[in-house]
Image (cartoon, helix red, strand yellow):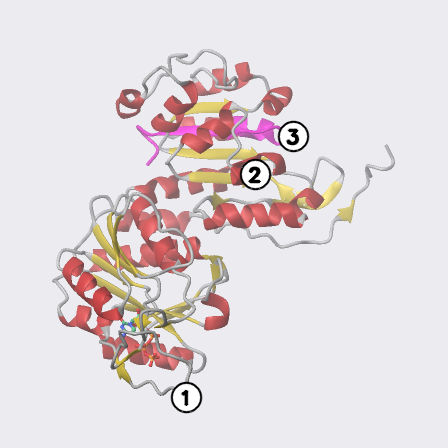
Amino acid sequence: MLSGRTVAVGVSGGIAAYKACELVRWLKARGSAVIVVMTRGAAEFVTPLTFQTLSGNPVVHDLWGDQSPGFDLPQGAARKVGGKVGHVDVAEAADVLVIAPATANLIARLVHGEAPDALTSVALASRSPLIVCPAMDVEMWRNPVTQANVRTLRARGAIVVGPESGPLASGLEGPGRLADIETIGQAVEEALVRRASLEGVRVLVGAGRTEEPIDPVRVLTNRSSGKMGFALAEGARDRGAEVTLVAGPASIDPPERVKRVGVATAAEMEKAMVEASRSAEVVLMAAAVADFRPRRVSTRKVKRDGSLELELEPNPDILARLASMRRKGQVLIGFALETEQGLRRARAKLQEKGVDLIVLNAPGEAIGSDTNRVTLVEARTARRLPVLSKREVAEEILDRALELRAARGGAGRAGRARQVAARTVPTPRARPAAPRRVAARREAR
Ligand code: CTP
């Protein structure tokens, strides 16, 4: 997996910087080209010469230094290096950027898009998968600011690996240790597999809410934010898919670099989805379609004189229609929002609508939130996931869509994706643990 690939290893200024030497060796041993990008703080812990020797490439640590230091890279990556602007060259050449260790300060800068040094500039210029491996003292990790920053990175699609719990350099004990090198290395492999897993596959996503006009001013709608559908579109795009996003109104901006078809009503959404589904190989219907629309739309603003009765008629079931015209081998995934008897109703929808998988969620956990807790419901299985960012939920759904596609003979790289995923140790999640004082207490010094 790593042979012929280029990995940019970002090192920021924490004591765990020395462990990044092992990561570079791990990656090199598996055939990857490595470019190390260091912050000034990192160079206080480990010299650039160490990383240069281990990686076999010049180390980028000065935004203002030599802009074309002459990297030794695989052909594909070498072609992308313009040799004019160092941090842009690294961002273009790297198939993945892994930052290990990532200090609290570095994470905060990533969140805010600050780029005062070479590493943050590479991160800002990069479109490749970003793996962030936090390492810091326990209270810095547990600080709500850091926790919020990490959530933001996850929501934007970064893969966060670690930290692990154990004794820390400060003398405290708790979460804050850099994840195991093997775990980080496997996350790099998995990111590489995922990155190409939908190369050239046509993916259609329905997202956002619909609005059904009552008069020129008012609409019937719902509280859906569009975040889940947009996360799916971003995830598919980042895996190399050709994404068409049919989007109703939403509370956030739609993703870049996808083909976007804007709609407002369910009827418009139906037309756009039907049209786009003719060529789509994977269809993901996350839109919150209004179930009813006013039978008559007033051309004038309805006045507040007396009471108002609206007669509603049902909207078409778009997902059921898509299922009825499904192309051979097409994977079709829908959602279900239920307040009660979720599993039973999701199963019923799976059957009635004729889809491969229903993503079951509840309004309290799904609507408007950046996170979601879903169950992936299929004919014979139901897999409940933990609370994840919507982007992480999207990745789980896309992984499963790939497996379903492979099962239908649509093959691709899903099989391999599955193998790597199975080998990858799940990312330890932030679980605040009480810091325990160990023998050498800081105050005693
Ligand atoms: N859906 C659709 N067209 C509709 C209503 C829903 O395509 N008119 C899709 C949604 O995008 C979702 C799935 O059907 O993928 C289930 O939506 P949900 O609102 O949970 O269920 P409904 O089919 O609307 O049924 P009910 O509201 O009675 O639970």
Quadrant of ligand 1: it is bottom left
Q: Position of residue 371 (x, y in %)?
A: 49, 59
Q: Nearer the viewer, mark 3 or mark 2?
A: 2
Q: Is residue 375 above or below residue 103?
A: below
Secondary structure category for the residue under label 2: helix
Q: Rounded to the nearest whole Å, what is the CA distance between mark 3 and mark 1?
A: 70 Å
Residue of label 3: 15
Residues 286 and 167: in front is: 286
Q: Residue at left 31%, top 61%?
A: 248
Q: Which residue is mark 2?
A: 107
Q: For marks 1 and 2, give the one nearer the viewer.
A: 1
Residue 348 rendering spot, x and y as whole percentages: 30, 81
Q: Closer to the N terminus: mark 3 or mark 2? A: 3
Sort mark 1 into few (<14), some (14-19) or many (20+) by Cα contacts within 10 Å.
few
- Find the magenta span and give its range: 1-21
Residues tagged 3 and 2 counted as in contact (Cβ below 8 A): no
In front: label 3 or label 1: 1
Q: Quadrant of the C terminus?
A: top right
The residue where tag 1 is placed is 307
- Which is more toward the observer, 315 or 206? 315
Q: Are marks 3 and 1 in contact (CB under 8 Å)?
A: no
For disc 3, the neighbor class at 10 Å (few under 14, some 14 to 19, many from 20) is many
Please name the residue shown 45% across and 20% down the image.
55
How far apart in space, not on screen, are marks 3 and 2 (Cα)? 16 Å
Q: Residues within 10 Å of mark 2 (few under 14, many from 20)?
A: many
For image coordinates 35% across by 87% down, the residue present is 309
Q: At label 2, which amino acid type do we have?
A: Ile
Left or right of residue 225, residue 354 in this image = left
Q: Is residue 10 visible?
A: yes
Query: Residue 46 location in percent, x, y?
Result: 60, 21
Q: Is residue 6 magenta?
A: yes
